[in-house]
Image (cartoon, grey):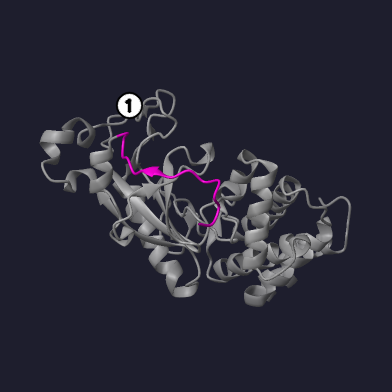
Amino acid sequence: MVFNFLKFKTFKVLGNEVLGAEFLPPQAAGNNQVCLISVRHGRAVTMKIDDLNWINIKGIGWTFGGPQIFRSRKDDNMMFGLMDEKDAARELAVSKYLQTICPDAPEVLGYKTFASIKDAKTRYGDIINIKHTNGKAVKPCVLYTKCKSPFRMSDIAFYKDSERLEMLSFYSNYFKCSPQEFIYKFAYKLAEQIGIFHAKGIINDSLYWDNITLCAEIVDYEWLTVPGMLLPNGQDAEHYIPEERKEKEIVYAIEAILRMANLFQLEVDFYKVLDALIAGHSVHNADFIKQSEFLTRMQNREMFIF
């Protein structure tokens, strides 16, 4: 088994093994073992299909071992441990569109609502009828997303040095490169996906290292700006300073990659990372790079850019 340090347990939803069995994805094929990758995955678990196919499952409760659900008193539209069907439906719709332009992107396979479970009103009426502090109904569901890697970049911080070396070896082999070149191959691959998105007017304002896997996959589509589709808060952000936001993604990508290199104890060159990102992005969206004064000045090694 790949990644022998991972610990798999019976799939539970809201701490309930019986409920977990009812929410197993169809692709599980009899497997009911899932893994909590790290505390960064506090409201999600991951199911292994094979070495390069994993299903990330969200909306299954808060997984730290305390209360499974609790309502935020500060944010009147937040419920820790649950996922709203409206958010899941948007993420599914975004994923379907992304598959038409970038088939390698992680695919949202679908979701299942608590209300669809047999005898749901009798068994889980308190959950089905739960509301935010602002009185809005939650309509909880469980969301399934297929990825090539179970790890986000930020997860690396929670593993031992020996386990990080195992990750680095595995993903260097995935990118067909040496561990020393992994960072630059990763940067190029990530930038290719960003370039495809940018060419289609898709902007990711949450391109943090929490939302990028070790196969350089961008995941979690809730807040992607997609042409013709409103954000979860109802805003139309498609025409709001798009070029500046795209440039910001490149900066966020650099920062995430440098953090990852540090955790893998790899010495990297900042500008070599930048050049790899520019090269990967240019495969699908060279005009944006050429027209960006900000990125051109970065490539020219300017120290201060105003």
Q: In this view, does 66 lie above or below 111?
A: above
Furthest residue toward top: 73
Reading the image, the residue beneath label 1 is 133
- Amino acid type of the residue tagged 1 in the rendering: Thr
Q: Measuring 20% from the left and 34% from the top, which residue is drawn there? A: 129
Q: Position of residue 154 (x, y in %)?
A: 61, 45
Q: Where is residue 136 in the image (x, y as percent from the top left)?
A: 28, 34
Question: Does 260 sit left or right of 229 as displayed?
Answer: right
Foreground pick, 57 / 197: 57
Q: Measuring 53% from the left and 70% from the top, which residue is drawn there? A: 200
Q: Is residue 254 above or below residue 17?
A: below
Q: Can residue 292 be seen in this view?
A: no
Q: Measuring 72% from the left and 45% from the top, which residue is drawn there? A: 263
Q: Quadrant of residue 93?
A: bottom left
Q: In which quarter of the image is residue 228?
A: bottom left
Label 1 element class: loop
Q: In this view, does 115 lie above or below 168?
A: above
Q: Position of residue 205 (x, y in %)?
A: 56, 51
Question: Is 295 included in the stretch rendered in magenta?
Answer: no
Q: Is residue 186 visible?
A: yes
Foreground pick, 33 / 192: 33
Q: What stretch is highlighted in magenta?
A: 1-15
